[in-house]
Amino acid sequence: MLSDLLLQNETKILLVVADGLGGLEKNGKTELEAARTPNLDALAKKSSLGLTTAVDIGITPGSGPAHLALFGYDPLEYEIGRGVLEALGIDYPLKKGDMAARCNFATMKGEVITDRRAGRIPTEENERLCKRLSEAIDTIEDIKVNIRPVKSHRFVAVFDGEGLSHELTESDPQQTGKPPQVIKALAEDAGKTARIVNRFVLQAQEVLESEKVANAILMRGFASLPDLVPFGVQYGLRAGAVATYPMYRGLARLVGMDVLETGSGWIDELRTLRDNYEKYDFFFLHFKETDAAGEDGDFEKKTKLIEEFDALIPQLLKMKFEVIAITGDHSTPAVLAGHSWHPNPFLLHAPQTALTEAEPGFSERRCARGILGHLYSLEVMSLLLAHAKRLKKFGA
């Protein structure tokens, strides 16, 4: 329906995703409630608030489907493994027929995994290990294996050849104290691929057995390129993405956004946003660190990062976007040390078109009482377009 209602104008839209923003109580307060956020609190008074659910009630989303939903692509229709997103995020020239996997370096003692992220080794160490693997493993049967570092403990393995399938189980047990899982075929035509990736895992462990920390690998997110209507076609927007972490750059590139070169810090991202303000109608601005702190179970660090994020709000407001949305892709409560099914706090600032809350405060509980109510993330793009006056009336 949206394609028939689109209007062109000069309004600009900013979607800010503080990854894993939502949380749960520790000593009676969530991370957002424990943080000092004077700028977000004041902005909330002049904005509309609500909660969003990425996939469905009670479903814990991965970052891929959570972001796709925010971009307006139904995550139940487009199930895209993180391997594709990680590969695109590092500018790997992925092509139709390739099968990509997101991999972690991990620590194994005896037969069990003791650290799924190998202590979040530095990226420089990751690069050294990927070089070791690449020198030792080039081809398995008739399939070329391409190994590329991503960041910290994560790397990508891209399998290039005929007859590959992404219909596979994962080797990551998702918790410590358990052995890596044998990868199994989920479809009749995936047997060959399962055999090859299991051989890759075993060969990698042989190469890494002398390493003290990163002596194993875990594989998940098997995926091949999907067919998507490009973001610019779907919404009539020139879209730019500002993100430092490869996966989110890959997500933006997957849907057809221009992925802008930026530095490694939040201030770098703001500078990139400001420098490219005139070139695009829509920006996706991503901050990763809040999610990482939540996954590490570090309530205090996540709280501090939210305070640092709050300090950036005045700079965003100076850029005069007609519509600003601030939210998380999913919740990552530090008390759970992982993604959760809880809804995400959502703020919509559109001075010309939005009803305002008329009282300060930005938190999960405050958003639950907000004007917007409870939305699905899939509804966010139509809401942003409407407030940017980019949708005409439906019907007579």
Image: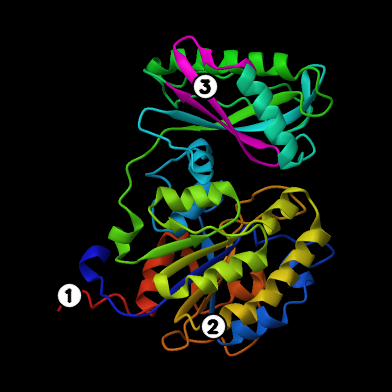
Asked which quadrant contains residue 212, the reply is: top right
Residue highlighted by disc 1: 395
Circle nearer the N terminus (1, 3): 3
Q: Are marks 1 and 3 in contact (CB under 8 Å)?
A: no
Q: Nearer the viewer, residue 57 or 50?
A: 50
The image position of residue 118, as x and y in percent, is 77, 34
**Mark 1 vs mark 2, CA separation in Å:** 29 Å
**Above or below for 74 versus 314:** above
Residue highlighted by disc 3: 145
* Mark 1, secondary structure of its residue: loop
Observer-side mark, 3 or 2, equals 3
Circle nearer the N terminus (1, 2): 2
Amino acid residing under circle 2: Ser
- How many C-alpha atoms fall within 10 Å of the one at disc 3: few (<14), some, or many (≥20)? many
* Mark 2, secondary structure of its residue: loop
**Above or below for 161 versus 66:** above
**Above or below for 330 versus 27:** above
Residue at the image point whose x is 44% and y is 73% from the top: 13
Asked if residue 389 shows in the view, the reply is yes
Residue highlighted by disc 2: 47
User: Looking at the rendering, in which quadrant would you find the N terminus?
Assistant: bottom left
